[in-house]
Amino acid sequence: MIRWTGDGPLPNYSSHLGQTGTWTSLAPSPCKTFDCTGRSYGYYADVATDCRIFHVCLPITDEEGAVAETAHFSFVCGNQTVFSQESLTCVLADEAVACAEAESLFEVSNAQFGIVDDVEV
């Protein structure tokens, strides 16, 4: 995610040479070191980006119930927020569990994620 600051119209991103102004990164690039392989369905803070990015891992099973692949989706938290592994939401940094502790909460916070109780109608 980037922001253009300069005079005039927004230039073509791929050909902005010669334009006055600058491109500013608003968020870190999605981390390429996070891997969903072997993870259960859930939300995961990206500690390598100081929890400003989080990932959703979704194991996809075959007809026999074995995991055939795991889908991986990455999201950037909004301005001045970080992902809290405790609440599974983006919050202000002082409201979040310390990012360094996020990995220790992966299993606990995702244990009931995606489980829907059977409700009689």
Image: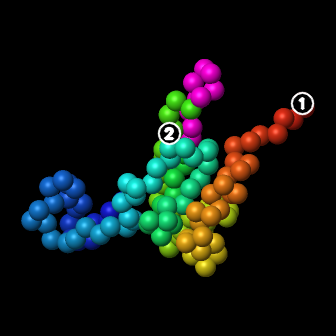
Which numbered marker is on residue 121? 1
What residue lies at 24% left-to-right and 60% top-to-bottom?
10
Q: Is residue 19 above or below residue 110?
A: below
The residue at the far bottom in this view is: 94
User: Considering only order in the chain, which callout, 2 or 1, is on the residue closer to the N terminus?
Assistant: 2
What residue lies at 74% left-to-right and 48% top-to-bottom?
112
Mark 1 vs 2: CB contact within 8 A: no
Q: Residues within 10 Å of mark 1 (few under 14, many from 20)?
A: few
Q: Is 59 covered by the magenta stretch?
A: yes
Q: Which quarter of the figure has residue 63?
A: top right
Q: Is residue 65 above or below residue 73?
A: above
Which numbered marker is on residue 1? none
Q: Nearer the viewer, residue 24 or 94?
A: 94
Q: Which quarter of the figure has residue 65?
A: top right
Which numbered marker is on residue 71? 2
Q: Which percent across, then down, holds residue 54?
A: 51, 57
Q: Disc 1 on helix, strand or loop? A: loop
Nearer the observer: mark 1 or 2; the answer is: 2
Could you tell whether 43 is left or right of 80 in the image?
Answer: right
What residue lies at 40% left-to-right and 56% top-to-bottom?
33
Q: Residues within 10 Å of mark 2 (few under 14, many from 20)?
A: few
Could you tell whether 85 is left or right of 19 in the image?
Answer: right
The residue at the far top in this view is: 63
The stretch of residues the image draws in magenta is 58-66
Q: Amino acid at mark 2?
A: Ala
Q: Amino acid at mark 1?
A: Val
Q: Disc 2 on helix, strand or loop? A: strand
Q: Which percent across, then down, holds residue 115?
A: 74, 42
Q: Which percent across, then down, holds residue 116?
A: 77, 40
